[in-house]
Image: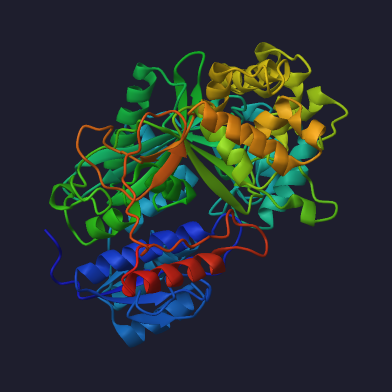
Amino acid sequence: MKDENIKKVLLLGSGALKIGEAGEFDYSGSQALKALREEGVKTVLINPNIATVQTSEGVADQIYFLPVQPHFVEEVIKKERPDGILLSFGGQTALNCGVELYRQGILEKYNVKVLGTPVQAIMDTEDRELFVQKLDEINVKTIKSEACENMEQTRKAAAELGYPVIIRAAYALGGLGSGFADNEEELVKLAEKAFSFSPQVLVEKSLKGWKEIEYEVVRDRYDNCITVCNMENFDPLGIHTGESIVIAPSQTLTNSEYHKLRALAIKIIRHIGIVGECNVQYAFDPQSEDYRVIEVNARLSRSSALASKATGYPLAFVAAKLGMGYGLFELKNSVTKTTSAFFEPALDYVVCKIPRWDLSKFRGVDKELGSSMKSVGEVMAIGRNFEEAIQKGLRMIGQGMHGFVENKELEIEDIDSALREPTDKRVFVISKAMHKGYTVDQIHDLTKIDKWFLEKLQHIIDIDEAMKKCNINTLDKELLRTAKVYGFTDFQIARAVGLEDELKSMRKASLVVRSRRKNYGILPVVKQIDTLAAEYPAQTNYLYVTYAGVKSDITFENDKRSIIVLGSGAYRIGSSVEFDWCGVQALNTIRKEGYRS
């Protein structure tokens, strides 16, 4: 049951957008405020970011454009006297601020109750030593790491653990100040940088090359748990999860591996005492079923936003309601409209998240990717198979229209080292290597990317190579259909069969393929994200277009009352959350005026 004593709640936002804290916390905060408003609770928001949806009129009752720092938060508490505070909807900034307020006794002084996950549980997940102790109590393996306060300790710890090691700054955002060291010289350089951000530096054994798997888990105060979504990184451990291509649900785990990690995730969050939502990250050795828990985020994260959109499960909304004291069994899923929130989504599609970088805007910047985040945004593509989803995603990030097939503009001198050292162009390097005849095994040895993914990418190249043997007149219906099912655009097909060179126009070439395709009756269908895998009727509003289907899931009403709004695409420098704000305002107005948006 809901806590009736809570009449006014303070929510901490994430402050200014930065790499590692962007639109995803505007999403989670807005959802939480919406959930509280539905409960008739007064809301107070602290967030100095003007370009967000959550700081707009009609989302929170009171908005303070102030830094998310203990001093300012105390002043607001003094003035507003809230009954409760939410800490897990504003990223690392809000979490760190909440811990400080608790330590300084400010929450106790003004009798403000922390809703959802208790502060002690947050500290247990954020402080490395406490975290390892906590998981040792239930015999769960963590990455062996030493917390060091100075350079001498750091050197000693690395020598004891044995190189290669990874260095991390504690309490830092988006992997700030972290990296891999193969020897003492690299260690000193990294540690000096890390100490400039944080009083505590963690040295841990490197598990580079293991798989990285994440589970999004929800728990209520009655100890009911569900895993909403599990995701798998295309890139092996060693690249920050925000820099990785991520696939949901995981594709390469066996049934026993999947259930082993799921059961562990639930055991962990019960023991830590999370109330609401959290995400558990694992390193997983594909050779032996050995695993390590990398970390637990006791808050919504960028992965949570992905999990929510990928499954149609309103994670942030549900987490806010659980913080108010509800049980999972008392809540409806506000997206599907038909099931309770106590229901694990089952997916009959694949979702692929691809990050977007803007590194070319800066002179002299290191293009290499590692444990510190550099991406400014990401896209999500939905398909009926992995090949379709990744091809769509690669086109969405705006790095050319070629999907996974050869990007002729990309020039690489040494393919081996380009595969070994990941950069923002790595996936296109794999495409180049495959065209040059590298085998899946060779690429796997250089990148440690799971062979399943590489075989699927090889499949895309094989279709491309098969089309290159045809011209437009010899391209048969079956091959054309196959290309469309696996995510090729008309333009990619036109290029493969040599039409683009022949007609000297991209547009004309695409139109020729399009008319041939229509003559064959190869047309797309519109599918709805069905998170219940057709066990129950679902009514989500997430739609995708695919050629791997027989009929559309929805009927289009031709009532001349529909308006399309175009968004800005992936975040980049110069085009970010402010256009989300514009889109939301436009859509609200369209709906108010009685049109369909």
Does residue 90 appear in this view? no
Please name whichever residue, 62 or 483, is drawn nearer the observer in this view of the structure: 483
Residue displayed at 67% across by 32% down: 492
- Residue 146 location (% of width, % of height): 56, 38
Judged from this view, the residue extending furthest toward the right is 413
Total numbered circles: 0
Residue at left offset 80%, top offset 51%: 365
Q: Where is residue 251 in the image (x, y as percent from the top left)?
A: 45, 24
Q: Position of residue 197 (x, y in %)?
A: 65, 58
Q: Residue at (49%, 29%) from the top-left corner?
A: 522
Quick check: 557 above or below 514?
A: below
Locate the N terminus by quadrant.
bottom left
Quadrant hosting residue 237: top right
486 vs 64, left or right, is right
Vertical comparison of 542 with 502: above or below: below
- Image quadrant where residue 87 sits: bottom left
Q: From the viewer's perspective, is 277 left or right of 166? A: left
Could you say which quadrant of the image residue 543 lies in? top left
Res. 557 visible in picture: yes
Residue 4 % position (x, y): 13, 69
In the image, is residue 365 above or below residue 37? above
Color scheme of the displayed model: rainbow
